[in-house]
């Protein structure tokens, strides 16, 4: 690979890493047209892709792309053998296959959340891919694999993110991970949103209060008034009791 092409590839890969959070191993979705072009130009996809990407890659396809090659007959038998070696990603058309171009577009959705690279020679597919921001595109030209420059839709998206008009996919993922760490996932928010059931009164508060025992009634005089005992009389009675209890001196008892 020439130095100029290598620098351009490194620049494009860094663009998708920084702006769309692409990480190794890079997932590359391949269709039958790309395998047919590689076969004609004698390109070993499995050997050259990691060198071109300067990192680990995962080559994959879909069941619809394989089914399409089977229906096209013997002319694409070699491309079918190459495509069968790659991992098959699940799509929603396993029972009812659709054209490979439509299947790959459905795998990307509107934002390419799984960070797929697309390798194809289908011109109708490439026009649809350029309308989706954040979709790197591979094609074969002059016996070499080339990673296309970011399209206008991708550049417009990045510019809006930089101006603060949009939130990038990388920022969305970091916000989602922070919410999960803080226990603010969708399930947790639903639990918090549920209204608390109204609880009944405390059973202890419903018990009847115990009546306090009435104090012993004070003695009353004949006039109906409370009888008060003077301190002087109590002191005199205590003194008499002490004198009576004291032992006598010389066998005599003092009379008060």
Image (spheres, helix red, strand yellow):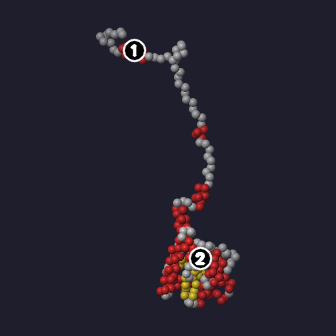
Q: In this rendering, does residue 52 appear at all?
A: yes
With respect to residue 229, does 185 lie above or below?
below
> Gap between marks 2 and 1, in whole Å?
115 Å
| Residue in the picture at 63% in, 79% down | 128
- Farthest residue in the right direction? 96
| Residue in the picture at 56% in, 79% down | 150
Q: Residue 198: image x %, image y %?
A: 62, 47
Which label was assigned to residue 89?
Answer: none
Q: Residue 173: image x %, image y %?
A: 54, 68
- Whichever of labels 2 and 1 marks the residue nearer the N terminus, that label is 2
Q: In this rendering, does residue 59 appear at all?
A: no
Which label was assigned to residue 236?
Answer: 1
Q: Quadrant of residue 160?
A: bottom right
Local secondary structure at mark 2: helix
Local secondary structure at mark 1: helix
Which label was assigned to residue 153?
Answer: 2
């Amino acid at each position: 690979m020439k130095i100029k092409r290598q620098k351009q590839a490194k620049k494009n890969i860094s663009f998708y890493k920084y702006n769309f959070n692409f990480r190794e191993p890079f997932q590359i979705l391949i269709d039958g047209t790309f395998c047919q072009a590689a076969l004609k130009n004698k390109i070993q996809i499995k050997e050259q892709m990691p060198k071109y990407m300067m990192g680990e890659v995962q080559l994959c396809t879909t069941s619809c792309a394989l089914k399409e090659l089977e229906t096209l007959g013997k002319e694409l038998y070699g491309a079918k053998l190459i495509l069968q070696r790659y991992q098959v990603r699940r799509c929603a058309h396993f029972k009812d296959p659709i054209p490979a171009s439509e299947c790959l577009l459905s795998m990307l959705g509107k934002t390419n959340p799984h960070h797929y690279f697309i390798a194809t020679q289908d011109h109708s597919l490439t026009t649809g891919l350029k309308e989706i921001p954040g979709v790197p595109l591979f094609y074969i030209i002059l016996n070499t694999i080339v990673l296309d420059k970011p399209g206008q839709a991708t550049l417009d998206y990045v510019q809006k993110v930089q101006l603060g008009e949009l939130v990038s996919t990388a920022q969305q993922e970091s916000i989602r991970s922070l919410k999960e760490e803080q226990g603010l996932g969708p399930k947790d928010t639903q639990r918090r949103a549920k209204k608390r059931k109204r609880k009944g009164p405390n059973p202890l508060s419903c018990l009847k209060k115990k009546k306090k025992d009435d104090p012993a009634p004070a003695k009353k005089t004949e006039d109906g008034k409370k009888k008060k005992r003077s301190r002087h009389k109590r002191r005199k009675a205590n003194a008499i009791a002490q004198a009576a209890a004291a032992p006598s001196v010389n066998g005599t008892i003092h009379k008060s």
